Image (spheres, rainbow, N blue to C red):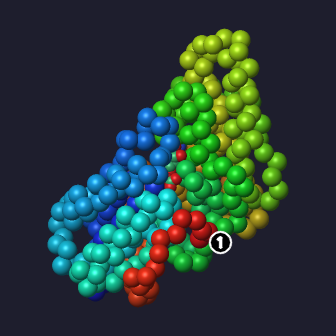
Amino acid sequence: MDEKKENIYILAIESSCDDTSAAVMRGDTVLSNVTASQAVHEQYGGVVPELASRAHELNIVPVVDAALKRAGIGKEQLSAIAFTRGPGLMGSLLVGVSFAKGLAASLGIPMVEVNHLQGHIMAHFIKEDGVDHKAPEYPFLCLMVSGGNSQIVKVDSYRNMEIVGQTIDDAAGEAMDKCAKVMGLGYPGGPIIDRLAREGNPKAYTFSKPHIPGLDYSFSGLKTSFLYTLRKLVADDPDYIEKHINDLAASFEATVVDILMDKLYKATKQLKIKRVALSGGVSANTALRQAFHDYAKRYGWEIFIPKFGFTTDNAAMIGIVGYHKFLEEDFCSMDQPAFSRTVI
Ligand code: KG4
C-alpha cells in the first residue's frame, strides 16, 4: 500500500437488521470492527423491526465510540464515512443512515453509500494487520447465503456483480431459522442446528428437494416436507423431537447444504469458473464449509471461506466497499434515502 492509501481512514456503519456495527478501516485493512447484537428478539423467535430500530438508536453512539477508540483514531482523522444504505429493515437502516449523514456533515467529510449484499461478497478482501490474507482473483463465483438472501453471484470486479441464480421463495438462513423454531429451538436457529447436527446422522431422514430449473433455489418445499414429517412423528410420540433432535438437525442441515451445493456446482460448469467463494451469515455453517472443502478436492475448485467474524453482519464488510468507492471518489449526497429491497 502506498503512502497515500495508508492515510485513508474510513468509518463504516452497518445497521440493516439486528446488529449495530461500526468499523474503522485504514485503507483495506480493518483496525476495529465492533458489533452490538440484539438479544431482545430471542423471546419472539425472530427479529421484531420496531424493537430493532430502538436498539440501534441505543447502540449506535457507544458502538461508533468503541470502534474509534479500539482503532486509536480520532474523528478528525477520518477521510470518509461509509454506511449501509440497503437492503434491510427500513427502520433499522434509517438509524445508521441518519447517524452517518449527521456525522459526515459535522466533520465536513464525504459519505459513501454501500449495498449490504455487495459488502457480504467483498468481505473476502478485508485485510488484517499481521494476518496472511489471500483474496479471490476476478472473476469468481460467490455463494451468498444469509437470513434474507440465497444467491449465486458472478463477481467481475467490486462493482460488477451479476446474480446468476437466487431463491424464488425463502432464503437458506430463513429456512434454518424457521425449522429450528418448529423444533422448539431458540433464535437464530442456524447456529443451534449447526451445533446439534454435529452429533447427528445426516442420512437418518430424507426430505424433499426442489426441482427448479436453471440456477435458482427454493427452500419452501423443504420447509413443508420437514414440517409434515415432524407432525407425523410427533403424533405417534410426543417426545419424538427431543429424543431425535441431533438426527433431525443433521438430516435437515445436510439437505440444505446439498441443495446449495448442487446449483453452485452447476454454475461452475455452466460459467466455467472454478474460483468459488462463500459469503453471508450461513457461511458460518460447519457442514457447508466442509462441503466447500470436499468439492474443492473433488473438482479442483479454488475456494475462499471468510473468517467467522466477517461472515455475519458486520461493518468491516461495508468499510472495504467504502474504501474502493472512496478511491474512485464515488461519493453520495445527503439526499440519498435508505432502501429496503433491491438486487446488487
Ligand atoms: O448475514 P446474516 O448475519 O444476516 C442477514 O441475513 O443479513 O445471516 C443471518 C443468518 C440467520 O438465518 C442465521 O440463522 C444464519 O445466518 N446462521 C447460520 C449459522 N450462523 C448464522 N446458519 C447455519 N449455521 C450457522 N452456523
Indicate if the residue with disc 1 has its beta carbon within 8 Å of ligand 1.
no
Q: Measuring from the top left, give residue 157's x and y in whole percent.
A: 55, 77
On the question of residue 170 being in view, the answer is: yes
* Label 1: how many Cα within 10 Å (few below 14, some 14–19, many 20+): some
In the rendered image, the vertical position of residue 186 relative to residue 37, given as above or below: above
Q: Is residue 205 left or right of residue 149?
A: right
Per the image, the residue denoted by label 1 is: 162
Residue 243 x %, y %: 58, 15
Q: Is residue 283 visible?
A: no
Residue 114 vertical placement versus 206 (above, below): below
Q: Nearer the viewer, residue 184 or 274?
A: 184
Q: Secondary structure at mark 1?
A: strand
Quadrant including the C terminus: bottom right
Q: Residue 82 falls in which quadrant of the image?
A: bottom left
Quarter-of-image position of residue 228: top right
**Foreground residue among 218 and 290:** 218
Image quarter in which the N terminus is found: bottom left
| Residue 81, x across and y down, in percent | 33, 75
Residue for point 69% across, 55% down = 167
Q: Quadrant of residue 156?
A: bottom right
Residue 229 position within the rendered picture, expressed as x and y whole percent measured from the top left: 73, 26
Residue at 75 percent across and 59 percent down: it is 215
Residue 128 in the image: above or below residue 19 = below
**Mark 1 residue type:** Glu
Q: Residue at x 44, y 76 (%)?
A: 113
Above or below, comparing residue 184 to residue 152 in the picture:
above
Residue, x 53% and y 57% (percent of image)? 279
